Structure formats: C-alpha cells, structure tokens
Amino acid sequence: MYKFKDIGLKLTPQRLAILDFLDGNTDHPSADDIYKAVSVQHPTMSFATVYNTLDTLRGKGQILELTIDPGKKRFDPCTDPHHHLICTSCRRVLDINMTFNLDLPEDVSGEFRLTGNHIEFYGICPACKDRN
Ligand SMILES: [Zn+2]
Ligand SMILES: [Zn+2]
C-alpha cells in the first residue's frame, strides 16, 4: 500500500519504481541516488523522469526537499515534522523523531505566527568513527 496516491502523473512502471523506492525510505536520497538505484531494474529510466517525479511529489507536499547537504539536494518521504542528525564525514542523515521545546520569546518572533522548526545536529556516525 503506497503512501503516495493521486500524484497527478500517469503512473508508468518507471514512476511506480521511483515511488516504491521512496516509500518508507529513511536514507534521504538525492535525485542521483534514486536514479542509480531504480535504473538497475529499469535501464530505460531517464534522469528527467526521476527529476520531474520528485518535483511533482514535492509540489504536492508528499516529499520534502532538504537543503541540509551542501553537495546535493536530498529528499525525504517522511513529511511529518522531524529533525535530522548529520554525519559530517559521510553525509549520512538520520531522522530524529523527538520534540524539543523551542518556543521563541515574543520579542524575538515579533509578528510571526510560528508554524514549525527544524534542527540539524552534526556529528560523526559510528561507521566513520570506527574508520578513524
Ligand atoms: Zn559517517
Ligand atoms: Zn528525515
């Protein structure tokens, strides 16, 4: 059962393979990662198909585009508010599903009605720690 329904695009086998790859994926893949993974089963897959499928999903709020990696845009099929833990060595990104009390005092938020926040934690993951 797909998380993604009614994405507003014709669901070709290629697009279904992209949705299938994204469904429940917690690796925060880039468009390139997705293209490489999916074209193993679908050698006729074009990068444009990956790109426009991601763009449509993002436009409909079904995936998030993350700008936490300066090297590449990454995509997150988990659209519930959550934070991220990022390895500064291999750029692995883990989800943090925990709420933090981050109320801003009114003299800081001013006229803003706050709707959310996103925290990035940085560190070295266990695999990178072992390598050094
Ligand atoms: Zn790492
Ligand atoms: Zn995430």
Image: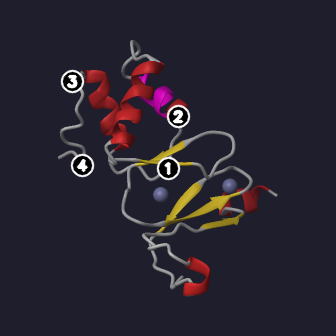
| Callout 1: SS | loop
Residue at figure coordinates x 72%, y 63% from the top left: 124
- Per the model, the C-alpha gap separating discs 4 and 1 is 17 Å
- Per the model, the C-alpha gap separating discs 1 and 3 is 26 Å
Viewer-nearest of discs 3 and 2: 3
Number of other residues with Cα within 10 Å of mark 1, as a class: few under 14, some 14 to 19, many 20 or more: some
Q: Which mark is residue 27?
A: 1
Viewer-nearest of discs 3 and 4: 3
Place of residue 12 in the rendered image (x, y in percent of width and height, measured from the top left): 24, 21
Q: Which residues are magenta?
A: 34-40
User: Which residue in the protein does label 3 denote?
Assistant: 10
User: Which residue in the protein does label 4 denote?
Assistant: 3
Place of residue 35 in the rendered image (x, y in percent of width and height, measured from the top left): 47, 27
Q: Nearer the viewer, residue 7 or 17?
A: 7
Viewer-nearest of discs 4 and 2: 4
Task: Name the magenta segment's main secondary structure.
Answer: helix
- Per the model, the C-alpha gap separating discs 4 and 2 is 20 Å
Amino acid type at image mark 3: Lys
Number of other residues with Cα within 10 Å of mark 2, as a class: few under 14, some 14 to 19, many 20 or more: few
Relative to 18, is 74 above or below? below
Q: Seen in the image, is 108 located left or right of residue 17?
A: right
Place of residue 77 in the rendered image (x, y in percent of width and height, measured from the top left): 38, 49
